[in-house]
Image (tube, grey):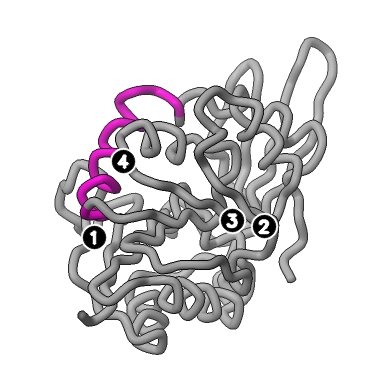
Amino acid sequence: MPHNIFVGRIAESYDEDSPEMYLPAVVEPAVDFLVDAASDGPALEFGIGTGRLALPLSRRGVAVHGVDISADMLGQLHSKPGSEVIATTLGDFATTTVPGEFSLVYLVYNVISNLTSQEEQVACFCNAAAHLAPGGRLVIELGVPDLRSFPPGAAAVPFEVSATRLGFDTLDIATQQLVSHHYLITGDRVALFESPHRFAWPSELDLMAQIAGLRLVERWGDWDRSAFTSASMKHVSVWQRPS
């Protein structure tokens, strides 16, 4: 079972530590995409967290159920207006099951990479497929590692340098393990948060989907359906359970 790192202060400050992810220009295209993918049916979010997308999706009329490993993150979600209509289940989303069938299962903002072994990621695909109704869709948003930014011999590569945060990624290509190191600065105090990930290329995810009985139907460079190219920094992929 994955280790829960989203506890205490990390959960309490999760939203304010990533304000750029709550901008309308970021949230609205994702919600529009997910509304279309849900096709008027219910949605299940794996790694629902504090409800960044679940809450606006619910306001658009989609019935949302969420699974998360962190009780503290779910506590943050349920402190927000509108959360009373969102059902949540505490557990590892690679294996936790909930009642019912869904027209959409979705994982956003690199959540699947929080499963740090291939076995867990395959289990997640299989779990998602088991929750989908015939014709239902699995949507995953996942970054693509920019290997060109890791010169030979580099110990780490910065992804943010500001007055309030220093962020560095370390990467082991052989094991597909990436760790994001966040140094959060408040006055003269510095707090460290480290987030481990396992990156997987789109082709590997497609194979996981095949194992789970799903087929790729769409792949985009972002929620706005821009083209996915060799220069894309992430992808939004859609797999479907046969009708």
Q: Earlier in the sequence, mark 3 or mark 4?
A: 4
Tell me the CA gap for discs 1 and 3. Answer: 32 Å
Where, quadrant-wise, is the C terminus in this rendering? bottom left
Badge nearest the viewer, 2 or 4: 4
Indicate the amino acid at tag 3: Val
> Mark 2 — residue?
196
Badge nearest the viewer, 3 or 4: 3
Residue 31 location, x and y as percent? 31, 39
Residue drawn at x 55%, y 79% is 123
Indicate the amino acid at tag 1: Ser
Badge nearest the viewer, 1 or 2: 2
Tell me the CA gap for discs 3 and 2. Answer: 20 Å
Residue drawn at x 16%, y 47% is 226
Badge nearest the viewer, 1 or 3: 3
Tell me the CA gap for discs 1 and 2. Answer: 25 Å
In the picture, the disc for residue 230 is: 1
Residue drawn at x 24%, y 60% is 230
> Mark 3 — residue?
67
Indicate the amino acid at tag 4: Ala
The answer to whether the residues at label 3 and label 2 have Cβ atoms under 8 Å apart is no
Badge 4 marks a residue whose secondary structure is helix
The magenta stretch is: 22-39
* Up/down of 226 relative to 202, above or below: above
Q: Quadrant of residue 135?
A: bottom left
Indicate the amino acid at tag 2: Pro
Badge 3 marks a residue whose secondary structure is strand
Badge 2 marks a residue whose secondary structure is strand
Residue drawn at x 21%, y 54% is 39
Tell me the CA gap for discs 3 and 4. Answer: 19 Å
